[in-house]
Amino acid sequence: MRKFLSVGIALAICVLCRAQQTTENDLDLLKSPSSPAAQLLNFAPSSIERPTDLSSFWLSVNNATSNFTKLPSSYAVDFSPAMLFGKASVTLYDLKTDKKNEKEKMGKVIWQTLDVSLGFKSEDDTLTGQSFSRAAFGAKFSLVRPSWSSSTLENYKNLSDLQSRLTDAVVLAQGDYENDPLYIKKLADNEKIKKDKGKQSPEYKAAQDELDALQGQLLQKYTKERIAAAATDTVNLYDKIKRSARDFTIERVGFFLDFAGGVAVRFPTNELGYSFADNAGAWLTGGYEGGNEKLSFYGIARYLYQPEKIYADTTGTISNKKISTFDMGTRLLYATKDDKFNLSAEAIYRSVLNKSIVDPSWRVVFAAEYDLGLNKKLTFNFGRDFNGVITKGGNLIAGLNFITGFGNKRGIGSGAAGK
Amino acid sequence: MAQIITFNFDREYDIKNDGSTIKLDVTIGDAKQSSDMTVKLNSKKLLSEFKQSVKGLVLGADTALKGSVLRINGNIADTSKDSNKVSLSVKVSGGVSVFTKKFSVNVDDEGETVIFSFIIRFTV
């Protein structure tokens, strides 16, 4: 009987967890898109081109326009101007932020995080059968960026120190190969070819290539020897760097503020002179990234003009023509270091700005979970739903659940705390 | 130890010998790769444990550089999760012509490190 009761409770919890996850997905719906222009034109993420250098960008545009002879029928591209047009590439060091010691300039943050998205699409009007074009422009960037976490800074310092030691080995190897008799002889031979045949002669250019090849061989040989000589344990310096670089990930902790926005324009007659704004959107996301400290919160404010779906209109009956909507949401997550206690809270507000048919509505959900150990968890959920507000003037859902597991001691997964 | 990828050259650079300023640029790529570099002019260290791209480093007036040797050494580790491409370009300007040399490689394994060693000899 006890077992049946436990199964029943476990099933009830599963249902409750699913309901909780659905609630959290509501806030995810407000999230800013990775590519604002592509989203406004309904492009699938896989069809967006993402060039990382100028030549691939050029190739992408060239292919889409058939050597600049026609407009593409369907094309979306995302690129980072800092990567494509920056005078110098952004190295890992340039991304390092340690707010305890340095303050980042907002201009630098915007430039490094700026992503521009462009899109173009030819479509057919289902009523008239006539084709028309849509073009979209979007941008997203960070205004405030969190600092690197202490563990990220420590990992970077380790990697950086190892790389400096490798540079020292390369410097020593350079001294070795410059004193190598083979290298000295090759330099002397090249000098003779230069004097005899001239600096611009093909013979001298070929001799220079031979010198480069010899230099590469000797550099490799002597660097390996220097690395072996400096080894203090079984793992050599080169392999240590490889491991450290491969495992390096950036974790950021602190306040952040991101902006994303885009506008799509329709050309009904496919003429540049006649166009109007089709739809548009702006997203402002801010909050605090907790990292290992495990306290995080974030908030989103979203404005949409003529959205495909009106979030506040659950019936889907309102025409989106000249409709503006404003939605916002916030979420707080907290977990103790031992993960025994988890807490989450989420609130969402949704509204239609220029239509009085739909009243603004909001929901609040709070969830807490405590791990008692020995397969037992105590969970608590509390919320106020959209529907309650609209139809009944607000209702309250509250529950206290006790979960126990069977068999050996194992962790019980639950979405109640909103991981 | 596995084969180490190297970027290297040993070149002469012709100066005008009229007091022109000689400058050096070393650009590290792709974005988010981690680098370390030492730049030495004869026995004088100009940059040490340098982790960024070098932009317009003034080496001095060409008249003072005649017969000098510039040595650039370092390494680039593949830390970018977006790309396995490791690239480097060296540019020396202010002399008879602009010298540019570009290197690029797609490393097979994540975290792989490329070493580089360049020698530039200033001549008239």
Image (cartoon, rainbow, N blue to C red):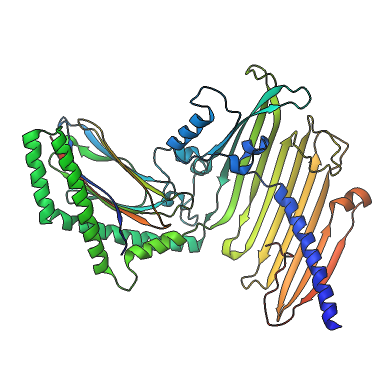
Which residue is nearer to you in this view: A67 or A276?
A67
From what the image shows, is residue A155 above or below residue A213? below
Residue B49 at least partly seen: no
Depth check: A189 or A84 in front?
A: A189
Residue at (81% x, 70% y) in the render: A11
For this orientation, the residue located farthest to the right is A392
Return the x and y of residue B78 as percentages of the image width and height: 41, 54
Say which residue appears at 20% left-offset and 51% top-offset. Answer: A215
State whether residue A35 appears in this view. yes
A217 with respect to A194 (left or right): right
The relative height of residue B50 versus residue A78 in the rendered view (above or below) is: below
Point out the image quarter for the N terminus of chain A: bottom right
Q: Quadrant of residue B68?
A: top left
Residue A124 against residue A113 in the figure, above or below: above
Q: Position of residue A78 (x, y in %)?
A: 55, 38
x%, y% of residue A44? 64, 41
Image coordinates for residue A264, horizontal then vertical, percent: 66, 30
Left or right of B86, for residue A286: right
